[in-house]
């Protein structure tokens, strides 16, 4: 049975194919001391800190083209190892659905043919989640921007490319092949209604897969776990009762932590233009506004905390290209979500996002 991604609306009415991995801006910090244990996107898992608790089972490796890690606390290490094996099998199966680097994946076949009459359930599930997010974010979350991504990647890989980016007519032509409203979902089918359309789920698939992994762990009875597939999701606190401490990197200096966030549940995701840049100057990135076809100019990075990793992942993508005045209203649509926005002009906006000092902390280059 497919676990539906959590995109619940607030009851508060007041208010390409680039790799699925990105440069990491979130790092696991040591329990107790808060010292960083990860550097430049290479996760290193902490030993159990002061305060006791069960001996954790650690795993780290590459999934979805990027370094990933899990920490599982259980009183029976054999159960934890079986759960870990089930998680890895589930993740690798989902890679076969969402990967843009595998020609045999469901998403690649959809993009190649414009339709799938017997689409796998996870793809349909995630596309329906994407439809809800597309509507709730005024269209800022739009998986149909793959033609724009491909345009920028092609432009800047050409020798002597104009540093000001693709010409307006090329952007207009790529935009004519986008528009998530032109994706038609049936009970078992998907159709892309515009010629030349292609989808990327890189703005939500990592979070969705993180949630799927978490669901597997829950079925094994694990209640003290941390899943890191680019987005962090906590299943409860550490077995000692202490929170997981996640360090947030500086947008332009991912080896330096600026502050920390404590998780006892829920998820956190970060999007930053520096994560995937098309040009050496850093003016153009994967954060593309579907309405204009241009890269986000104002945001340096955005971190989102939410009940699910899919929601945190997608909102961090969408809000990075949203007009400043619309960010808070969209965030209120999801009542348990909060965001930390760092602007290129040096300003910081904190919307229901906890504050924890990270003074004196830096990433450990040996991690």
Image (cartoon, helix red, strand yellow):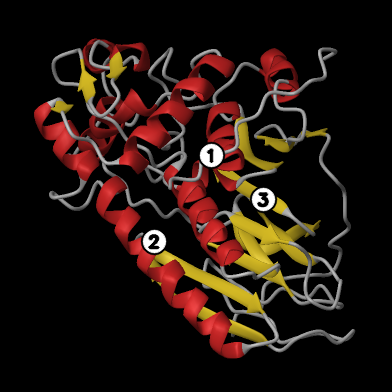
Q: Nearer the viewer, residue 286 or 240?
A: 240
Q: Residue at x 74, y 55 (%)?
A: 265
Image quadrant assignment for residue 343: top right
Q: Position of residue 297 (x, y in %)?
A: 54, 26
Q: Position of residue 196 (x, y in %)?
A: 15, 20
Dots 3 and 2: beta carbons under 8 Å?
A: no
Residue 164 appears in the rendering = no
Say which of marks 3 and 2 sits in front. Answer: 2
Q: Position of residue 56 (x, y in %)?
A: 67, 84
Circle 2 sits on which residue? Answer: 91
As displayed, is residue 27 above or below residue 75?
A: above
Q: Is residue 342 left or right of residue 68?
A: right
Q: Residues within 10 Å of mark 3 (few under 14, many from 20)?
A: many
Q: Is residue 350 left or right of residue 80?
A: right
Image quadrant assignment for residue 313: top right
Dots 1 and 3: beta carbons under 8 Å?
A: no
Circle 1 sits on which residue? Answer: 5
- Earlier in the chain: of badge 1 and badge 2, it is 1
Q: Residue at x 81, y 41 (%)?
A: 353
Circle 3 sits on which residue? Answer: 267
Q: How far is the residue under mark 3 from the one under mark 2?
A: 18 Å
Q: Position of residue 364 (x, y in %)?
A: 66, 79
As displayed, is residue 272 above or below residue 344?
A: below
Residue 215 appears in the rendering = yes
As displayed, is residue 156 above or below residue 262?
A: above
Question: Dot 3: what SS?
Answer: strand
Q: How far is the residue under mark 1 from the one under mark 2?
A: 15 Å
């Amino acid at each position: 049975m497919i676990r539906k991604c959590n995109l619940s609306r607030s009851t508060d009415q007041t208010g390409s194919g680039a790799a699925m991995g990105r440069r990491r801006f979130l790092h696991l910090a040591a329990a107790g001391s808060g010292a960083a244990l990860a550097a430049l996107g290479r996760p290193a898992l902490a030993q159990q800190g002061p305060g006791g608790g069960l001996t954790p089972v650690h795993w780290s490796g590459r999934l979805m083209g990027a370094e990933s890690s899990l920490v599982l606390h259980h009183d029976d290490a054999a159960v934890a190892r079986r759960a870990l094996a089930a998680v890895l099998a589930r993740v690798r199966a989902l890679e076969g659905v969402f990967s843009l680097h595998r020609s045999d994946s469901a998403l690649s076949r959809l993009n190649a043919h414009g339709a799938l009459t017997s689409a796998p359930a996870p793809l349909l599930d995630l596309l329906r989640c994407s439809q809800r997010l597309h509507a709730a974010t005024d269209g800022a979350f739009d998986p149909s921007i793959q033609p724009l991504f491909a345009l920028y990647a092609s432009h800047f890989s050409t020798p002597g490319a104009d540093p000001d980016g693709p010409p307006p007519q090329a952007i207009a032509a790529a935009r004519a092949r986008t528009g998530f409203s032109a994706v038609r979902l049936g009970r078992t089918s998907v159709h892309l209604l515009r010629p030349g359309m292609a989808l990327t789920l890189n703005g939500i698939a990592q979070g969705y897969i993180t949630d799927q992994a978490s669901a597997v762990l829950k079925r094994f009875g694990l209640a003290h776990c941390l899943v890191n597939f680019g987005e962090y999701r906590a299943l409860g606190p550490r077995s000692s009762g202490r929170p997981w401490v996640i360090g947030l990197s500086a947008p332009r200096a991912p080896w330096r932590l600026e502050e920390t966030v404590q998780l006892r549940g829920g998820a956190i995701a970060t999007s930053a233009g520096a994560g995937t840049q098309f040009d050496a100057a850093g003016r153009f990135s994967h954060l593309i506004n579907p309405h204009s076809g241009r890269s986000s100019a104002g945001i340096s990075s955005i971190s989102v905390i939410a009940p699910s990793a899919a929601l945190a992942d997608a909102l961090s993508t969408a809000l990075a290209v949203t007009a400043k005045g619309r960010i808070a209203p969209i965030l209120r649509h999801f009542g348990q979500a909060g965001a930390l926005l760092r602007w290129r002009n040096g300003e910081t906006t904190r919307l229901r996002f906890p504050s924890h000092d990270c003074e004196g902390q830096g990433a450990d280059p040996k991690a």
